[in-house]
Image (cartoon, grey):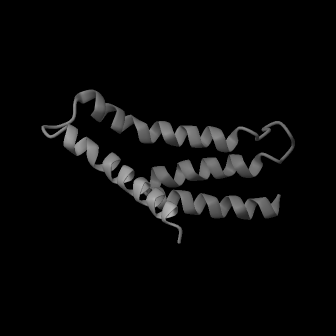
Amino acid sequence: MNSYYLIIIAVVALTTIFIRFAPFIIFKNGAPKIVTDIGNMLPYAIMMMLVVYCLKNVNFFAGNHSLPEFIAVLFVILIHKLKHNVLLSIVSSTVLYMCLLHIF
């Protein structure tokens, strides 16, 4: 393997390690309230961005082409409200969506 690639891998690894440990080094006495608030809101914001990205090209007014997407979205909401398990919600709604694609 070329030494150039090893240097790149080492720099990327060290950068990743630094980024992971930087908050613990910077906030030894606890994080400020704004940082903890952003940390609490960020997962929900990311999930909403993923939902918008996944549904951006879906035409809900074009026959039954959007029916699998609509059913899968409702199903993931229902399963998550009932079981409070993210992995179960994602996997079960993905399987349902794939099955619905073959039906419709």
Residue 64: horizontal and vertical position, in percent? 83, 47
Q: Exactly how many numbered labels are in the figure? A: 0
Seen at 54% across and 48% down, the residue is: 77
Residue 6, compared with residue 14, is above or below; it is below
In the depicted view, which residue is nearer to us: 53 or 80?
53
- Residue lying at the far bottom of the rendered structure: 1
Residue 2: horizontal and vertical position, in percent? 53, 67
In the depicted view, which residue is nearer to us: 29 or 26?
26
Seen at 20% across and 43% down, the residue is: 25
Seen at 80% across and 38% down, the residue is: 59
Q: Is residue 48 left or right of residue 54?
A: left
Residue 32: horizontal and vertical position, in percent? 22, 30
Residue 70, compared with residue 42, is above or below; it is below
In the depicted view, which residue is nearer to us: 75 or 15?
15
- Residue lying at the far right of the rendered structure: 63
- Residue lying at the far front of the rendered structure: 3
Q: Is residue 23 left or right of residue 80?
A: left
- Residue lying at the far left of the rendered structure: 29
Residue 91, compared with residue 42, is above or below; it is below
The quarter of the image holding the C terminus is: bottom right
The picture quadrant where one finds residue 10 is bottom left
Q: Is residue 31 left or right of residue 103?
A: left
- Residue 84 in view here: no
- Residue 16 in view here: yes
Seen at 61% across and 47% down, the residue is: 74
